[in-house]
Image (cartoon, rainbow, N blue to C red):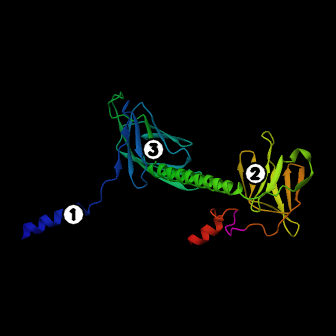
Amino acid sequence: MKHHCAIALIVTAIWSSPALALETPRGAPQDNRIRFVDYQPYNVTKVVGSLRSSVQIEFAGDEEIAHVALGNTVAWEVAPAGNILFLKPRENQPMTNISVVTTRRDGSTRSYQIELTARDGPVAAGQDTYFYIKYRYPGDEAERRRAQAAAQTQAAQASAADKVLALHEQYGPRNWRYSAQGTAPLEPQAVYDNGKITTFAFRGNQEMPAIYMENSDGTESLVPKSVDGDLVLVHAIGRKFILQRGGDVLCVFNEAYDPVGVNPDTNTTSPSVERVLKAQTANAQQ
């Protein structure tokens, strides 16, 4: 029974011991003196410095070294420069450490713990030699891929919505009774609406101005719109539109304004496409 208890205690001690978190940078296939290591905030990175040689450590491109604490300042030289840290062993002394804190562009910080060992001997390829160490950041790469995928999805959805709006714009009778007054170079080639959407057709080489709509109280507001080639599709019907580019202004009047128009109750001109403000989406998710 005593032997069984002893074995049980040994097994328990083994399983309860914390795993070592010492990371040895992996050598590049072409030359093992060039090394790479994945960043883990609670791991220690092993660095071996060779006498009469230096070591360059590169952190993320959006980081800048803010603080450096070197354990043995007699045996090692250190020189930070932006996101690069240069190390050089002076003497072959026992293992020591260096702590590095960097600041990122977003204001957050990262901490690095590095174990330093000095050795003497050849520094040719194939030896335990470190010339250059680059940190890699799998978490950052995954976040960038997620953001890129989300942006692509959003762009695809916006493109699909514009196509649906353009499809709805093509149907229905058109009101061509529009007049203009103001700066002639701003005047579109044609203006018309179909009771749901107002279309401004510009010439191919004509710079498109900002388009405002006059409200019932006389104030002006930007209107939601989409662009399809030389056409600007304004998702509204109004009595008066104001086109502006720099100091040039052109007023466009709807001579056959219909205050009822067509209301698909989706905040757009299409019953198939609904416009949702980002603030509304955020509130709905809370």
Q: First in sequence, mark 2 or 3: give its number.
A: 3
Location of mark 3 (residue) = 135
- Looking at this view, is 41 or 66 the one in front? 41
- As measured in the structure, the alpha-carbon distance from the residue carrying label 2 to the one carrying label 3 is 48 Å
Left or right: 43, with 236 as reference point: left
The residue under label 2 is 232
Residue 142 position in % (x across, y down): 47, 51
Three-letter amino acid code of the residue under disc 1:
Ala
The alpha-carbon separation of the residues under discs 2 and 1 comes to 73 Å
**Residue 32 placement: quadrant:** top left
**Disc 2 versus disc 1: nearer the observer:** 2
Residue in view at x 26 percent, y 61 percent:
17
- Mark 1 vs mark 3: which is more N-terminal? 1
Residue at image mark 1: 13
Return the x and y of residue 137 as percentages of the image width and height.
Answer: 46, 48
Residue displayed at 71% across by 45% down: 229
User: Horizontal placement of 237 versus 32: left or right?
Assistant: right
Residue at 93%, 51% in the rendered image: 182
